[in-house]
Image (tube, helix red, strand yellow):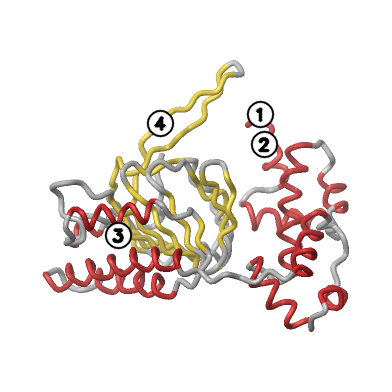
Amino acid sequence: MQFHCIGCPKIDRFTGIWEAVAIMKNDGNTRARTESLAVIYSDTQERRVFNLAEAGLREVPALGFSRYSHVIAPVGTHRHAGCLEIGLCLRGALTLLNNGQEHRIMPGDLYLNKPSDTHCLTAHPKGTVIHWLLIREPRRGQAFLRLTHPEARDLWRRLTRLPCHIIARTDTVKHAFAHLFKYHAQPAGPYRTVGLTAACTSLLMGVIDAASHKSVIARPPLIEQLTAAIREHPERDLRLDALAREARLSPSLLIAQFKQITGLPPIHFQLACRLEKAKRLLAETDTPITQLAFDLGFCASQHFSGHFKRAFGLTPTAWRKQAAAAH
C-alpha cells in the first residue's frame, strides 16, 4: 500500500515507517494482516512531502503539507512503526479514526497518532489544508535533536502522554511548521541543519505547551442544553433568532459561544449532527436514501448526498455498502 502522487517528476520511497492493518474476511472470520506502507516524497502545489533526514535532521523522515482541491480516497487503517505523527489542521475539517474512536478535527486543532495507534483519516474533504510530520522515537546511542538521552526521553514521554486531539491555541506550532519548510528551502550546510533542529524542537515544545495550557471553555447551561437538543433531534428546523431567545443571548453572542464550545456556528453544527446521524441510520437501517434525507431535514436527496460526500469522501450508497461489508 502506498501514497501516490501524480505528476511528480521525482519520487523516492521510504518504506517501513508505516504499517497497514488490513482486516481480511474469510468464510465469515476476520483476521488482521500487516503490510508495509511507503511514504512517497513529492513537491507539488497540492502536496509537499520532504525527507528531512536528507537535510541533516534524521529524526524527521517525513514533513508534509497537503491541500485537497478535490475529495480523494483515504488511506486505510494503519500505524506508524517507531514514529509519532503530528498534524495541524489549517483549513476545512477532518474526521480522524484513532483506535476506534472518531474525532472531528477543526481548523487550528492538533492531532497526534502514537506508534501503537491504529488510525486513519476517514475523509479528505475538498478545501482541507493540513501540516503534518513523522518523528522517530529516540533511541539510546542515537542523536535526537542534539539533546542528551534523558532530555530526549522526557520530551518523548510527554508527547506520547498527550491526547490524540488537542483543541487549543496553536500559533506556535503553526509558525514552527512554517520555519521547517523555510529552512528546508535553504542551501545545504550547517546553518540549514541548525535551523531545522531548532524549528523541530520548537514545534514539539509548542505541542506540549498547547495541550497543557489549553483554555478552559465556559459551558453555559443553556448553550449545553441547546447543543444536546440539536444532537438528539438534528432534523428539526433551526432558527437563529429563536435559539438566541432561548439562550437569552444576542444572535452574534450565541454564534460566538457556540463556536467556542463546538468549533462550529449553530447551522453548521446542526449539519454535522445530521450527517453523523445519517451514518448511523445508513449502517443500521434499510431506509431508502431519499426518505432518509427528508427525515433528517434535507430538502432533497441530492442536497443530502452532496453534503455527505464532502464530509466523508463517500456517497451515502457507498457508505451503506461499506458498512454492510464490514459486518
| Mark nearer the viewer, 3 or 1 | 1
Image marks 2 and 4: residues in contact by CB distance under 8 Å: no
Mark closer to the chain start, 3 or 1? 3
Figure quadrant of residue 207: bottom left
Instruction: Compare residues 132 and 163 and report the one nearer the observer.
Output: 163
Q: Which is nearer the N-term, disc 4 or disc 1?
A: 4
Q: Is residue 85 left or right of residue 154?
A: right
* Mark drawn on residue 34: 4
Q: Residues at badges 2 and 1 in contact (C-beta under 8 Å)?
A: yes
* x then y, percent, for residue 103: 58, 53
Residue bearing mark 3: 50
Q: Which residue is mark 2?
A: 323
For disc 2, the neighbor class at 10 Å (few under 14, some 14 to 19, many from 20) is some
Q: Are marks 3 and 1 in contact (CB under 8 Å)?
A: no
Residue depth check, mark 4 versus mark 3: number of the one nearer the observer:
4
In which quadrant of the rendered image does the N terminus lie? top left
Seen in the picture, residue 291 relative to 49 is either above or below; the reply is: above
SS for dot 3: strand
